[in-house]
Each structure stands twice: as C-alpha cells, then as structure tokens.
Amino acid sequence: MRSQETCGPNVQPVLMLYDRSLQVRAEIENIYTDLKDGIYLMQLLELLSGESLPRPNRGKMRVHFLENNSKAITFLKSKQVQVKVIGPENIVDGDRTLILGLIWIIILRFQISSIKLDKLFANEALLLWCQHKTASYPNVNVKDFSKSWSDGLAFNALIHAHRPDLINYSSLRQDQPIKNLNNAFNVAEKELGISKLLDAEDVAVPSPDERSIMTYVSLYYHYFSRMKQGQTNQKRLAKVNLINLGKITLLYEQMVSDLLKWIKQKVIELDDRIFPNSLQEMWLLMANFKTFRTVEKPPKYQDKGMIEAHLFNIRTKQRANNLRLYVPPEGRTLQDVEKHWIILEKAEHNRGKALQKEMLRLEKLEQLAKRFLKKAALREAYLEDMRKVIGKQDFWPESIDRMEAASKKLEAIVADVLPRRERFAALAEMATVISQNNYHSKDQIVKNTMQEILALLRDIDAIMEELKELQVLSTLQQHTAHTVNNVCP
C-alpha cells in the first residue's frame, strides 16, 4: 500500500480500480499533482457513474485546469453529492486535505452507497452482509472494517461462502495472517478479476485502515451480487427456455401430425385407379397431377425439412441447458415422416405411370372409334338400300311356276351381300371392342350403327334360309315333272 504522502491508503483502491477498468497501465504517482488538470477526475467520474461528462479542455494553462475541475464538481453537485467546502482551485492548488476528502466522498457515493439492505446506511448494510456470509466460519467474527480483517480469515470466508471450489478454508491457520491475506487477494485477483488493491503487510496490523478495507470489501459485494444476479438470470432464462422448448416441442408434433395427415390423404388419392373414359377428362386429371407435383408437393417437402430443423433446434437447446433430450412419441419420429414420405413418392410414381398408360389406351380407343365411324359411314348408304330391297320383296311366290324366278332374286341378293358380310362382321367386332373398353360414346355406336348392321345380317340369314327352302321345292318340282313325262310319254 502506498504511503499517505503520495496517495493515501483510503483513496488508492478506487484509483487503482479506475486504472484496471480502463485498462490504463500508468498509475498515479502523486494524487495531488496528477489530478491537477481535472481530466483524470472527469474520467474517473464517468467510469464510476456510467454517464458522460462534457469534453475536457486539453489546454495546459491554469484556466483550463480550473474549467475541467469545475465541470467535475458541477457533475457531483448534480448527483446531490455534498462538496460545498471544495472548489476547483483547491484541486488545482493541490490542497491535500480537501482532495483526500473529495476522493473518499466519491468512493462513498459511487462505490459503497449503492449497497442497500432494508433501511440501513451503506456501510452498515455492507457490514451486515459480511457478518451474514461469514457467521458459520470458525475464527471469523466480523464486527468492523478494521481489526476483524487483519488475520485474513474473513476475506477467505467471504470467497469460500460464494465459491467453495476456490478456497480450502480448513487448511487456513489464524496464526498465519500474511499467508491468509495473500491467499485471498491472489484468488480474488486471479479467479474473480478483483484487483489486488491492498498489501497483506498493511492489513496484518493491529488497526488496518478502515476506509481501504471497506472499499476493497465493497468490490467483493458488487462482484458476488452480479454473480447472484447472473445466476438468477440464468435460472429465469432456463425457465423461459423450458417454456419455449415446450412450445417448440408442441409445434414439432403438430407439424408432424399435419404432414402425415396430408401424406395419408394424398396416398389414397394417388392410389385411385377409377379414371374417366374421355381424353378431355383425362387431360384434366393429368393437369391436376402436374399441379400436385409442382405446386402442392414442394411446400410440403419444405415442411419436412422444417420438421427436421425444429427437432435439431430442440435438442441443441436441451444440450445447451443440460436437459434430457426430447424423444418424439411413437408415430411422430423423423423415421415415421421419412417412411411415409417414401410411400408418398412411390404412390406418386405409380400414379404417373397409370395415367400415362390410361392416356395411351384412350388415345388408341379414340382412333379405333374414329375408324369405326368412318367405315360405318361408308356402308350407311348400302345398308339403307338393302333395307329397302329386303323390305319390298315377298320372296315366296304365289304359284309354283314363279318359284324359280323368286329363287333367282334371292340368289342375287345373297350374292350381293355375302362378299360384304365379313366387312360387316369386322365392323361389328370393332364396335364390340369399343364397347368393352368403355368408350365414352359406346352407347350411341351400339344403339345406332351396330343395330343396323346386326339387323341386316339377321335379314340376310333369313333370306338364305328361305333360299334353301325354295331351292328344295324347285328341285322337288323338277323331279316330279320329269317323272310324269316318263310315265306318260
């Protein structure tokens, strides 16, 4: 610890704290001269208050020093700090008593006064906090900020109360104050980032400086308060994370349920093989299938990727918070999603093949129907003429003498129709194929053209039967006439 002459044991800690926080390597050598220009004092107030002061004047004249120190004192007054007895000229002139008093006022206002407990003053609250934290430790009895700390056990107890992993308290001996003090100061500096503001030799005395110890202990208080607040914040954050994890988990399960429901419904639709029997309606089905593949399915594939990302996010957060990893319920795992997606793609592939096959079948059937109608149209006039001929003829003669003439007419009709019989039969077979393949206009073809062809064929069959009967009668007549001629020459 520096001597009272240069810095004073009661002001050194806060100035060293300032140096450390600003990462300034140069230390104050003489407080009375180094604070003279007011720049250091303004920077100190900015650091401790967390507020900005007006820019200091960098001039080297007395008037510039007075201006800077006036800004610092004005700022203190704005914070209701009582500095009535000190003015800018006292700092510029190096008034030791007033400067030391000012520094201690700043320490109290910004370093210690923030410590509150019920309605106690800051120093009382800090003392009560120390007593509460060290009450259970042997050989520690904190009654003040002087003699109670000289053996170093209280410092070690404070650290052990908050971080038992850093101090082996049972190994400490009350008759080794220097060792105890250095142990606490070194651990605080290395593990907690609290600068070693005190020297063990200055504390291990019958009555160490009260203000220096109070200032140094206040650093412990602020550090452990921040640590406690951080732990509280971590607990709150963990609670919030748990709530968020619950929401994300529910979202994951809902997304899986929605996607699987959509997949199952689509598989049913894709497996349907009841197709329309017209090319126009089939083209509409093909268009709908294309819409499914290019418009409806891609967003669902993105949903599938989002489901995987959600589960990864859930497990990442759980690992970060040391929580048990979430296992999706049966039927909602990524494996279930992948399995059903494969089923969907297989159904999609088969649907595409079935549609193509049906399109080819209908195109061939359409071509067959066109050929049928074209051939039927060519034979329509002949059918009409033959219906008229057959309708007008009475092939059974009124007498036996006209039998031969009737037979010749029948032979002429049969001779005209028989060469076309195979063509009509082929046409009828085409109509049967069209009907069996569920052509969309099959009823019209069967009802009109086919009925006419079949009627003509039935008529021809009847004529041929009649022709046979006439031929038998004609033969019988000729035989009878020949017999009569032989008997009666």
Image (spheres, rainbow, N blue to C red):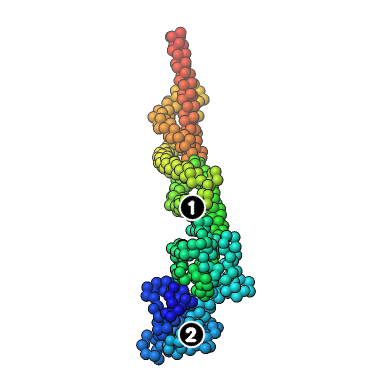
At x 46% / y 74%, what residue is drawn?
13
| For marks 1 and 2 on the same chain, the one whose residue lies earlier in the sequence | 2
Give the answer, above or below, for where 251 lies relative to 348: below
Give the answer, above or below, for where 59 lies relative to 481: below
221, 290: nearer the viewer: 221
Is residue 233 visible to the viewer in this orientation of the structure?
no
The circle drawn on residue 97 is 2
- Judge from the rendering whether residue 38 lies leftward or rightward of residue 228; answer left or right: left
Q: Are marks 1 and 2 in contact (CB under 8 Å)?
A: no
- Judge from the rendering whether residue 306 lies leftward or rightward of residue 138; answer left or right: left
The circle drawn on residue 336 is none
For badge 1, the amino acid type reads: Arg
In the rendered image, the residue lying farthest to the bottom is: 63
- Disc 1 is placed on an element classified as helix
At x 49% / y 29%, what residue is drawn?
458
Quadrant where the C terminus is found in the figure: top left
Question: Mark 1 sits on what residue?
Answer: 319
212, 177: nearer the viewer: 177
Image coordinates of residue 172 in percent, x first then y, are 50, 59
Give the answer, above or below, for where 354 lies relative to 35: above
- Disc 2 is placed on an element classified as helix
At x 46% / y 62%, what residue is drawn?
179
